[in-house]
Amino acid sequence: MLPPHHFDYIIVGAGSAGCVLADRLTASGQHRVLLLEAGGHDRNIWIHIPLGYGKLFHNPKVNWLYTTEPEPDLGNRKIIQPCGKVLGGSSSINGLLYVRGQPEDYDHWRQLGNAGWGFSDVLPYFRRAEDQERGPDALHGVGGPLAVSNVSEPHPLCEAFIQATQQAGFPRNDDFNGPTQEGAGYFQLTARKGRRCSTAVGYLRSAWRRPNLAVVTNALATRILFSARRAVGVEYRRDTTLQTAYASGEVIVAGGAFNSPRLLQLSGIGPPDLLRSFGIPVIADMPGVGAELRDHYQVRMQYRCTEPITMNDVLNRWRHRIRAGLRYVISRKGMLTIGAGYAGAFLRTRPLASPDVQVHFLIFSADTAGAALHPFSGFMTSICQLRPESRGFVRIKSSDPNAPPAIQPRYLSSRSDCETTVAGMKLLRTIMSQPAMRRYIAQELEPGEECRSDTDMLSFARLTGTTVYHPTSTCRMGSDSGAVVDERLRVRGIDALRIIDGSIMPTLVSGNTNAAIVMIAEKGADLILQDAGAPLALI
Ligand SMILES: Cc1cc2nc3c(=O)[nH]c(=O)nc-3n(C[C@H](O)[C@H](O)[C@H](O)COP(=O)(O)OP(=O)(O)OC[C@H]3O[C@@H](n4cnc5c(N)ncnc54)[C@H](O)[C@@H]3O)c2cc1C
């Protein structure tokens, strides 16, 4: 049965941010909220088993399966851009790593003129969201909807990597979200007892039963409706029928860094020439909508392992695979609990105030993300520059709401990104050559020994690198003419319209993006409630 058509708030997108918003805005029982999600329910079992994320890369039932336009600085390669299309959004298909970024990231947002977004301002929202397995402290919270847990057990290869990083002169770090980010250690995961804690699981499940929340899945928002310069509703398609819902309070766009600018452009908010070229009437001339796309670009280095202790050895043999499955079912431990990184590191490639590269260390090897594992013992590491300068764009290619947008991140278009990437690869080689790691390396498969000079390494990076899946900043927060939302996440110059998701980041945070987006939504919900006159716990 379809819900009635009038609400206080309409949220477009039940992703990392949208599920948080749906929960927080309905908690008091005072507001009627409609949550629209283009994808379906999160019933696929591989969503909930951490290792299953590899099976979701190419699954159109849960993934928008976008690809970039040919990237000029990557030999015109098109890069895949997986993106969740299911309850929980990308938090249902991501690699589960819980990393907030550096306090300096948020202090920088505040320095850019965004009052209320410094680290001391946002820390209470990180803590409010969190249910930290290790217990509470000044930086961590317990009892929140987002479960954060340790890896289920150490692994000899990860121990060797951490030790080798120490031998190369960096500290061990057991909490990348602790007082300092620098060093090597194990990641923590957004999981509880070996199962993924997406925002659909953490936030939406408990909110679902509230009578003031209507959730409509398989509902693609096709247009925001306006009365003059006020957002008043959303048109959406469910199956083949076009529906309309109205919001007396606000419309909140939470479609993610690709789809939020796309929906705004389809609705007449964006670069006027682009909109006119597709016959879309211009509601607001905003060149920043879809501009300034930023993403982390990673380069993988792969190794043949001397010992049969990698995930390749387990998953390529039926007997081991069954044993791993049984172990998971019985004790929620082992290979099936692993996310997109097991151990990792945040390092400085030169004297800087804070790390400029992130390393993901994985105990398997494969030609590409989501591909079959190599038939031999192997593992890999990847390096990405944390604060890339390269910027691209997202632009509609048609007025058809079903057509994918043009996505062009312009990876490695900035000289400093190229330099930091090569410096990171060299640093990784230094770590891998330390005694603790050397005993496990039979061969560096990629880039391989013939790749020596900086030019060789940059060329390898251009020809093989790929996204770490952290697109942001396409509806950037700020007060300059390129900014799309103000510091209260309201679309500038338009009434009753906010954007609350990864697209509003003024700059990309120095780490994986899910935790920061959950924080943004926690704070965004408070801003909405405050503007509606509610007393607030944290502001
Ligand atoms: C493969 C992968 C691995 C990742 N690994 C990690 C990791 O390990 N750790 C980490 O911190 N981050 C990771 N990330 C990044 C992180 O998950 C995302 O940055 C974050 O989930 C984005 O949140 P969001 O709310 O901005 O958008 P999303 O979570 O993508 O949510 C947007 C939602 O809106 C819906 N939607 C969009 N348009 C419409 C429309 N027109 N109508 C209706 N619904 C719509 C979408 O279907 C989606 O459900 C990963 C991402 C991916 C894709």
Image (tube, helix red, strand yellow):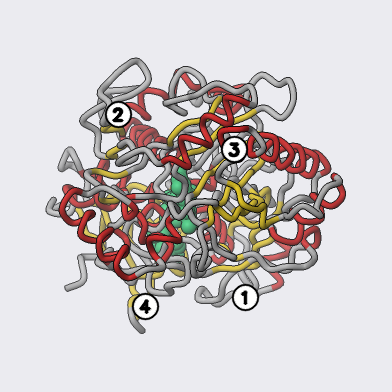
Residue at point 59%, 57% (across, down): 269
Callout 2: 10 Å neighbours few (<14), some, many (20+)? Answer: many
Residue neighbourhood size for the residue with mark 3, other residues' Cα within 10 Å, grouped as few (<14), some (14–19), many (≥20): many
For the residues bearing labels 1 and 3, Cβ distance under 8 angstroms = no
The residue indicated by pointer 3 is 358
Amino acid, disc 1 = Ser
Q: Which marked residue is nearer to the observer: mark 2 or mark 3?
A: 3
How much space separates mark 4 and mark 3, taking CA atoms? 45 Å
Quadrant hosting residue 188: top left
* First-in-chain label (4 vs 2): 2
Q: Nearer the viewer, mark 1 or mark 2?
A: 2
The local secondary structure at tag 1 comes to loop
Question: Where residue 242 is drawn, which disc sits there?
Answer: 4
- Residue 128 marker: 2
What's the residue at 55%, 58% (across, down)? 258
Q: Position of residue 458 (x, y in %)?
A: 80, 50
Q: Secondary structure at mark 3?
A: strand
Quadrant including the C terminus: top left
**Residue that numbered label 1 is attached to:** 398
Q: CA distance from mark 1 to mark 2?
A: 41 Å
- For marks 4 and 1, the one nearer the N-term is 4
Nearer mark to the viewer, of 4 and 1: 1
Is tag 1's residue or tag 2's residue first in the polypeptide sequence? 2
Q: Amino acid at mark 3?
A: Gln
Q: Are marks 4 and 3 in contact (CB under 8 Å)?
A: no
Image position of 501 with respect to 373: above or below: above
